[in-house]
Amino acid sequence: MPSKDMRFDVVDYIIFALLLLFSAAIGLFYGFIDKRRKKKKGDVENGAIGQSTNTAKDYLLAGKSMGVFPTAMSLLASFMSAITILGTPAEIYIYGTQYWIICISYIFTVYLTATLFMPMFVKLEVTSAYEYLEKRFDRNVRLVASVIFSVQMIVYMALVLYAPALALSQVTGLNVWISVISIGVICTMYTTVGGMKAVMWTDVFQTIIMFVGLLASVIQGVIDAGGSRAVWQRALDGGRVEFFNFDPDPTTRHTVWSILFGATFTWLAIYGFNQTQVQRYLCVPTVRHAKLALLFNLIGLVFILSLCCGVGLVIFAKYHLCDPLKLGLIKQSDQLYPLFVMETLRRFKGLPGIFLACVFSGALSTLSSGLNSLAAVVLADIIKFFYRKPLTDKQDLLYSKLLSLVFGVVCILVTYLVSLLGNLLQATLSLFGVLSGPISAIFMIGFFLPWINSAGALIGLIVSVIIQIWIFVGSQVLRSEMRSFRLPTRIDGCTNLRENVTMLVNTTITSPIWYQTQTTSLCRTLIKKSPLVPFYGMSYFWYTMFSIFTALVVSVVVSFFTGFRKPESMDPKFIIPVFDILFPFLPERILSKLRFGVRYGQNSIQADVKDKVQEQSSRHRMGTINESHSNPTYLHDENNDKKQIGEAEWIVRTKL
C-alpha cells in the first residue's frame, strides 16, 4: 500500500472533479443549448434549415462545420492516450532515446495522409471509412473490416480506461473502480448527448491539460536535477542517448529503419484509414481545411511526444542511481511517471492534481473518440448491412445515440474483464497493433492495385489477420526466450534500504564499472530454444508492414486464380493515381504507363483539372493527350472546394 505522503489530497481531487465537470458541461452545451439556439436561428431564416441540423450526419460529422484548430487538437488527442503519457517516459527510461526519432515518421505519415488518403475519403463523402471497401470490392469485405475495427476499438478503449487507473492506484492509492466508472460514465454521457462537436471541443480542452501537465513535470524535473545539462549528462552516462542505430536485424526493438519505415506504416494505419481519424477529416468544410488541420496536428504531435520523452529523461536523471523497478518499489514501468510526480511535485499544491487531470484527459479524449467512431461504423456498416430497409434521419440519429450509450456501457464491462487478465494486460494492448495492420493493408490494395478482385481482398484480409494473431501469440508464449533490450540500471546510490537490499548492493553491484561493462552480456542475451524465436521476435514496428506484405501476396494469388479485374473497367474515382500525385515531374509517357490502364479521363472529376492537363501536355510536347488516360490528379484545390460547398458558403466559412 502507498504511504500517506504519496496520496492525492483534497486539492488534487478537486482539480480532477473540475476536469470531469467541465467536460460534461461541454457535452450538455452542444447537446441542448447550442442545438436549440441554432434551431431557433434556422427557423427565423428558413424553417427547413432548422430541421436539417438535427440529423445523424450532423451528430457524427458535426455538420462539416468544425474549424481547423479544434480539428487539429482532436486529431492529436484521439490516439495520444493515457497509455502514451505513461508509456513513453517509461520507454525512454528503460530503452533509451532511439524511440524519439519517431517524430520523423510523423512527418512522412502526415504528408502521405494529406496528399493521398484524406482527399479520397473527403471526395467520396462517406460517413464510415469502410464504405469505400464496399464501393471498391463488395459488402462482405466492408463487413469483415468493420467487425475487426469494432473489436479492436472496444479492447483498446477498455485498456485506455483501465491501465492508467491501475498504474495510479498502485502508486497513490487512487481507487481503480471509482476512476474507471467516473471517467466512463462522464465520457459516455457527453459523447451520447453532444455528438461529434462535444467530442472535438472536449478534446481541445483535454489536450491543453495534457500539455500543461507534461510541461510542468519537465520543468520541475530539470530544476531538481540541476539543469538541462545535468539531465543530459546523466542520460549519456547511463547509456540512454541513442539516435543512430542502423542495425538491420528486424528483431532489434528500435532502429532507424524500423522507426522510419515500420513506424510510418504503423501510424498510417491510424491517420490514413482508422475511422476515428477519418471521421475528423469529414468534419471540416473542405480538403484545404483538413490539410491545415493535419499540419497543425503534426506540430502538436512532435511537441507532445518531445515532452513525453523529456519526462523520461528527467525521470532517469532522478533515479539513475536508484532504480525503483529493481528495488521493487513499483511493479510495472508505467508506474514510473506517477511515482516521479508524487515524489517531485508533491510539495506544490495542486500540481499532482494537474498530473492526474493530464493522465485522465488522455483517457477521456481517446474514449470519447472511440465511442463516436464505433457508433458511426456499427450503424453504417453492420446494422444497415442486416437491416435492408432504409432508415429515416430520425432513426439514424436515435440509433447513433443509442450505440454511443451502449458502447460506453460495454467498454466499462470489458474493462472489468481486462482487470482479470493480470500479466496479459500488456499482451492485450499489443493486439491493437496486430489488428490495425490488416485493415490498412486492404485499403492500400484497394487504392493502388486495380487488378485485385473482391475474393482476393477478402481472403487476403482474413489470412493477414490470422497470421498476425499467430505471430502475436507466438511472441507472447516465447517471450522469455527472446532478446532483452532493457538498458542496465543501478541501485548502489539508494539510501535507507532494507537489509536485504543492502546485501544485494554489496554482493552484486559494487561499483559503477559493473554498470558500464555489463550492458551487452546481461541485457542482450539470446537463449535459442525454438527456431521460430527470430521470427516471433520481430520488432512490433514491423507488424503493419508484414501484414501489408501478407495481404498483398495472398490477394494477388487469389485474384490470379479467380480472375484479375481489368483496370480499364474500374471506376477511376476509387483508385488513387499515386505516381501522378507523388511524382508529377515525370514525363507523360512514363506516367501514362504507371496508370496501369485505369481510364481516369472518364472520371467527371477530371473536368476540374482540364487546364492543368493541357498545360502538362504542352510542357512535354506530347500533343493532345488521350482523354481516357489524362492526368488523374484528383486533389481538391481551393477552386474545387468552392464548387463543392458553393461560392457564398465558401466565403462565410473561410472568414470564420
Image (tube, rainbow, N blue to C red):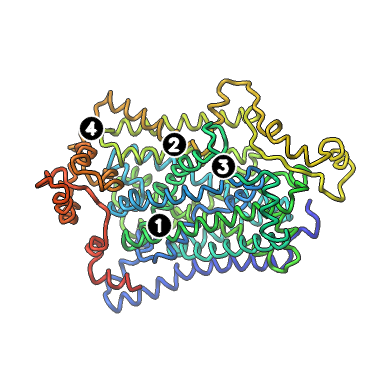
The label on residue 280 is 1
In the rendered image, residue 123, in percent from the top left (x then y), is placed at 28, 53
Q: Pick the quarter of the image with the C terminus.
A: bottom left
User: Is 589 situated above or below 284?
Assistant: above
User: Is 18 situated above or below 418?
Assistant: below
Is 468 left or right of 334, judged from the image as shown?
A: left
The label on residue 545 is 2
Residue behind mark 3: 429
Q: How many C-alpha atoms fall within 10 Å of the one at disc 3: few (<14), some, or many (≥20)? A: some
Q: Which residue is painted at 57% across and 34% down in the image?
A: 252
N-term mark: 1 or 3: 1
Give amino acid for label 2: Met
Is 173 left or right of 462, judged from the image as shown?
A: right
Q: Which residue is painted at 13% across and 51% down in the image?
A: 618
Is 177 left or right of 570, judged from the image as shown?
A: right
Determine whether the residue tagged by mark 2 lies in a helix, strand or loop.
helix
In the rendered image, residue 542, in percent from the top left (x then y), is placed at 49, 36
N-term mark: 3 or 2: 3
Question: Could you tell me how far apart the alpha carbons at marks 1 and 3 are, in whole angstroms?
Answer: 24 Å
N-term mark: 3 or 4: 3
In the rendered image, is residue 192 in sight?
no
Determine whether the residue tagged by mark 1 lies in a helix, strand or loop.
helix
Residue behind mark 4: 565
Question: Could you tell me how far apart the alpha carbons at marks 3 and 4 are, in whole angstroms?
Answer: 38 Å
Q: Are marks 4 and 1 in contact (CB under 8 Å)?
A: no
Q: How many C-alpha atoms fall within 10 Å of the one at disc 2: few (<14), some, or many (≥20)? A: many
Q: Nearer the viewer, residue 99 or 388?
A: 99
